[in-house]
Amino acid sequence: MKLIVHKEDDALYLRLDDSEIVESEEVKEGIILDYNREGEVVGIEVLHVSRRSPNSLKQILLESV
């Protein structure tokens, strides 16, 4: 799993695995899901992150439970 932060693009991308992306769908304004051949979600992109949470790209807290 990878979390990629694009400060310049104001975007956050979570890649769940390395399978090939064959389709993408914007499910809500600025929320894009990437699918593999089996129809599983393998990536999640959030655009305009700073509008959703003003300090979100300045500090990211990762928590594993």
Image (cartoon, rainbow, N blue to C red):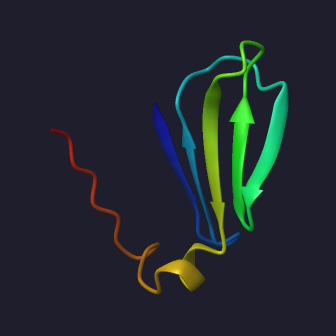
Please, is residue 3 above or below residue 2 in the view? below
Please, is residue 31 above or below residue 38 in the view? below
- Residue at 15% x, 38% y: name it: 65
Residue 56 as seen in the image, left or right of residue 59: right
Position of residue 46 measured from the top left corner of the image (x, y, whole percent): 62, 60
**Viewer-proximal residue among 45 and 29:** 29
Please, is residue 9 above or below residue 19 in the view? below
Position of residue 3 measured from the top left corner of the image (x, y, whole percent): 48, 45
- Residue at 78% x, 53% y: name it: 26
Q: Residue furthest left?
A: 65
Please, is residue 60 above or below residue 27 in the view? below
Residue 10 as seen in the image, left or right of residue 22: left
Q: Residue furthest top?
A: 38
- Residue at 45% x, 30% y: name it: 1
**Viewer-proximal residue among 24 and 19:** 24
Residue 21 as seen in the image, left or right of residue 10: right
- Residue at 27% x, 60% y: name it: 61
Position of residue 10 measured from the top left corner of the image (x, y, whole percent): 64, 72
Q: Residue furthest right?
A: 23
Residue 64: quarter of image: top left
